[in-house]
Amino acid sequence: MIDPETDFEQTVTYARRIQMAALMVALIAAGSFIAIPLPGTPVPIVLQNLFVVLTGIVLPPAWALITVAVYLVMGALGLPVFAGATGGLAHFAGPTGGFLVGFAAAAAATAVVMNLRGGASGRPGRTRLVGALGLGFLLPYILGVPWLARVTGLSLPAALGAGALPFLPGDAVKAIVLYLLLRTVPDSLWRHLR
């Protein structure tokens, strides 16, 4: 027998996730317009990764992965959603290609950590939230730095120095700000996320 109440709840959950996914694609793209070039590296400082990690915080793993994949496909098709309001398939073959692919992995991995068993309120514990944020901010480097080394011909230590080390302090600040903001989210809202 069909339960209208359960059917309605599933429809509302699906609609909420569609809206959240669309919002996150827009925020990730908006984060690309804030790109600060650093001397000595082809990788700019951006806010995209903050919104990629937030995608993994607020959506389940499959939804987070699909959301970031939609963003990446938009950029691959030439829409100006990558750093510096650029786009095109060539970005995946260039120095930032590994970081872009790392965004999808980061969103999915963050969501997996967030899906681990939580309390009755749905609010993640401090350890789980710190773990999710740490993984989300580090995974693009794990994939992006070797790709940067391969594409540019730099040694791995040189690529680490050019593509990761200058950005880690800024990412630590982003993670702390995101952590502090997420700790203020009321329990009632956490129950409706994910």
Image (cartoon, grey):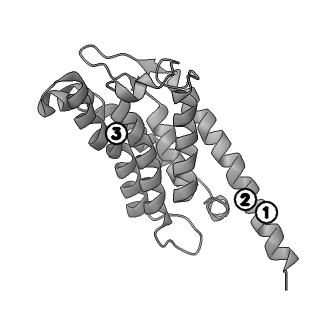
Secondary structure under badge 2? Answer: helix
Left or right placement of residue 174 versus residue 56 in this view:
left
Furthest-right residue in view? Answer: 4
Residue placed under numbered mark 2 in the picture: 14
The residue closer to the viewer here, 177 or 47, is: 47
Secondary structure under badge 3? Answer: helix
Q: CA distance from mark 3 to mark 2?
A: 33 Å
Q: Residue at x 51, y 35 (%)?
A: 72
Q: CA distance from mark 1 to mark 2?
A: 5 Å
* Picture layout, residue 180 above or below residue 144: below
- Name the image quarter holding residue 80: top right
Left or right placement of residue 155 versus residue 38 in this view:
left
Residue placed under numbered mark 1 in the picture: 11
* Picture layout, residue 37 above or below residue 114: above
Q: Looking at the image, do the residues carrying marks 1 and 2 touch, with CB atoms under 8 Å apart?
A: yes
Which label sits on residue 172? 3
- Name the image quarter holding residue 145: top left
One can see residue 182 in this view? no
Q: Earlier in the sequence, mark 1 or mark 3?
A: 1
Q: Residue at x 85, y 86 (%)?
A: 1
How far from the left and from the top, in percent, is residue 176? 40, 43
Dot 1 amino acid type:
Thr
Quadrant where the C terminus sits is bottom right
Q: Residue at x 75, y 67 (%)?
A: 10
Dot 2 amino acid type:
Tyr
Furthest-bottom residue in view? Answer: 1
Dot 3 amino acid type:
Ala
- Name the image quarter holding residue 189: bottom right
